[in-house]
Image (cartoon, grey):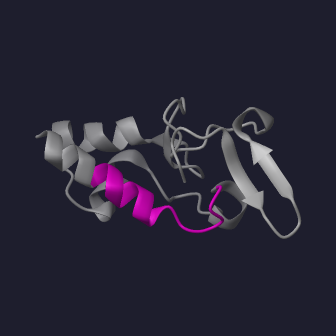
Amino acid sequence: MNEECDIIYYNPESGVKFEKQQVKLPIWFKKDANPKYACYCSKVTEEQVIDAVIKHGAKTVKDIIEITGAMKNAQCEKNNPLGKCCHKIIQEAIDKGLSMK
């Protein structure tokens, strides 16, 4: 989860590893991810979440879902690099937006 490291996935037991240039989608926690997705399933970016907080007054994940459409096409196990729901990533983007207000 180091934002500076080029490796996005590794398994020390099997020796399998992937670097960010080997994958099609940018990985949200990498410093140079462009775009920086908060929700991979609905293609909602961190920037869109922050914008919803600052310009539209969003304060909760429910607000973000209504404003941006995030989490509407939920196939997180397939689309999210973590293989789980993006709720935590969206909440982190909301917190970032709230701190910018």
Q: Is residue 57 visible?
A: no
Give whichever of 65, 35 is nearer the camera: 35
Left or right position of 62 against 37: left
Give the position of the N terminus as an image quadrant: bottom right
Q: Residue at x 75, y 36 (%)?
A: 24
Q: State which region is magenta.
A: 81-94
The answer to whether residue 80 is above or below residue 28 is: below
In the rendered image, the quadrant that contains the C terminus is top left
Pinpoint residue 41: horizontal percent, then vertical percent: 60, 52
In the rendered image, residue 77, in percent from the top left (x then y), is placed at 68, 66
The answer to whether residue 71 is visible is yes
Name the residue located 86 percent from the left edge and 57 percent from the top edge: 16
Q: Is residue 90 magenta?
A: yes
Q: Quarter of the image holding residue 82? A: bottom right
> With 9 as the anchor, is 86 left or right in this view?
left
What residue is at 49 percent from the left and 59 percent from the top?
71
Residue placed at 48% from the left, 43% from the top? 44
Q: Position of residue 15 (x, y in %)?
A: 87, 60
- Exactly how many numbered labels are in the figure? 0
Confirm whether the magenta stretch covers residue 18: no
Please, is residue 95 above or below residue 85 in the view? above
From the viewer's perspective, tell me whether residue 53 is left or right of residue 21: left
Q: Nearer the viewer, residue 73 or 99?
A: 99
Residue extending farthest to the left is 101
For this view, does 69 lie left or right of residue 4?
left
Depth check: 75 or 100 in front? Answer: 100
Against 75, residue 7 (above or below) is above
